[in-house]
Image (cartoon, rainbow, N blue to C red):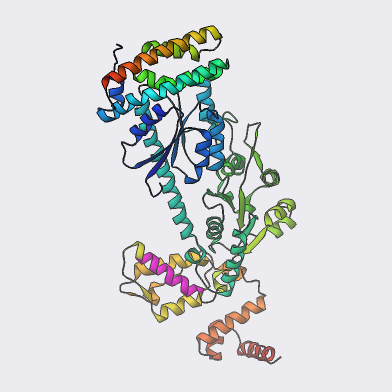
Amino acid sequence: MKKLNFKKLDEISSGNEEFKRKMVVLFKTTSLDALEALQQALAKEDLYEMARIAHRMKPSVVALDLKEMQNDITFLEREGINLDQARQSVESIRLEIYDTILAIDALEWQ
Amino acid sequence: MNEEGYCIFIVEDDPWYGQVLEYHLNLNPDYHIRRYESGKELLQNMHVRPDLITLDFSLPDMKGDEIFRKIKEIHPDIPVIVISSQEDISMAVKLLKMGVSDYLLKDDNTKDLLWNSIIRIRENQNLKKEVDTLKEELGQRFEFQNSIIGNSPAIQKVFNLIEKAVKTNITVSISGETGTGKELVAKAIHYNSSRRKNKFVAVNMGAIPNELIESELFGHEKGAFTGAITRKIGKFEQADGGTIFLDEIAELDLNNQTKLLRVLQEREITRVGGANKVKLDVRVIVATHQDLAEKVKKNEFREDLFYRILGLPISLPPLRDRGNDVMILAKFFLEAFARENNLHALTLNAAAKQKILKYNFPGNVRELKAVMELGAVLSDGKEISEEDITFSSVSNDKLFSVENKTLKEYTRDIIKYHLKKNNRDVMATAKQLDIGKSTIYNLLKDDEASEES
């Protein structure tokens, strides 16, 4: 099971536990929405849109300290990547999101 | 600030980050937050008129610079803070040049930077509101009824012309003897016109040496001449959007008249030593106590400039032609002086009033004000007596020079004055003036004849 690090999120929420939990749970929906958008953009071979979506995901991924996903996102934001490289990054992001969601569910925060 | 508090719009397409910003800003109970996820959604809600907008640079439907332009078209005064995940210095510079209040990066410091940025913007907004309020108050001070006192037909005519002047941007030329209130009228026009929120810049042309006039009026670039160590913005540029008041315009020499004429024609200036033209929107009011038409005849004033600045001429009557206004003004000055100096209310006794009414005030309203203030200081009680009223006109020449009378008419005035003073005693008057009685009788006969005819 993936281990989650809430140090940055604790700082953002200024010790407000309720807000922290709300943001962790919210991550499940926002990351799945972003993943779907990434996959649609990939299907359309729209690298510019993929970079934009990756860019949008960044603050939550950084806040939850998801380092691997952060690397993939930074890669997608880069100019000059090809479709194969983008496809690999999206797949990596997909796996990371699923792992994270499993870890969040295990916390049993609603 | 609207009724709900300080209203902030957050425009952020990432719901997760939008929630973070909302949570953070909601820590201030004064802030009322609304959140939108697209540029379109924001623009649809601009009628709410927020106090501030935080804008994500990369929205799905519009780029940050595009939406910023649209915001400014709707409400140019609303401050906008752009928040971006990418450090793009050239874009940040571009946005700041366009008028964005701040450009912040989404990182660990964003919440503190945003917090400080909003505090700074609010301070500026409060200062601006304070300045606007002060300007409003200043405007009220210069409302006609508060600043120009009197109800004589002569001054009513002036009110009428001021009312016409405030409705348009026409150039106004004010003439009148010294002390008649030319600058007061210029301010009344400015502060009652649509330009009241912008600057009123007064320049006394007589007080600036001719060789400095150009730089003073139009500014200069750094290094334009020895001593020009920095760029200087001239009076015309300072008055952009507002009004420039050129007092004592007749003092301008012919060389500077030509330069002024060009600026008034082109509505643009070039700073001394500069190459670029600066377009200006300035209302011009000029004033003089001299006869400009006469100066044109003598080739001392350019005819083309004369017609350019004539615009709406307002001639201010001397105090001696304003009938009972002198007493209204005297009362006004006494009240104002008592108020400003925490004194009890002062009144004029009958003899003091008579003394004031008989005097012709060559220094006009300015002189009356000084006389009243001195009277208030000299008075021992609540009443100002005849002895407390002291006139000290610089020159009695004005008594004669301003009235365009013939020597015969002046002679008649003097004789009649002394006759009245001597209760129509012809002998006493003749003795006092060292003239023959027949001169007085002849004068009285002429007067009777002219009255009968």
Magenta region: which residues?
Answer: B325-338
Q: As displayed, is residue B98 above or below residue B134?
A: above
Residue ID at (61%, 68%): B402
Q: Viewer-proximal residue, B74 or B169? A: B74
Q: Is residue B30 visible?
A: yes
Where does residue B366 sit, x and y in percent of width and height?
49, 63
Residue placed most toward the observer, B121 or B216: B121
The quadrant in which residue A58 appears is top left
**Res. B85 visible in picture:** no
- Kindly identify the residue that appears in the image at 68 percent across and 92 percent down: B452
Q: Is residue B43 above or below residue B4?
A: above
Image location of residue A89, percent across then percent down:
47, 10
Residue occupying the point 33% across, 26% down = A23
In the depicted structure, whether residue B94 falls above or below residue A43: below
Q: Quadrant of the C terminus of chain B?
A: bottom right
Confirm whether the magenta stretch covers residue B34. no
* Left or right, residue B404 beside residue B59: right
Q: Which secondary structure dominates the residues rendered in magenta?
A: helix
Q: Position of residue B34 (x, y in %)?
A: 41, 39
Asked if B27 appears above or below B445 in the picture, the reply is above
Camera-nearest residue between B141 and A65: A65
Taking the image as shown, residue B20 lies to the left or right of residue B139, namely: left
Residue B4: percent from the left, percent from the top? 38, 47
Looking at this view, is A2 or B3 the one in front? A2
Q: How many marks?
A: 0
Residue at 62% across / 82% down in the picture? B412
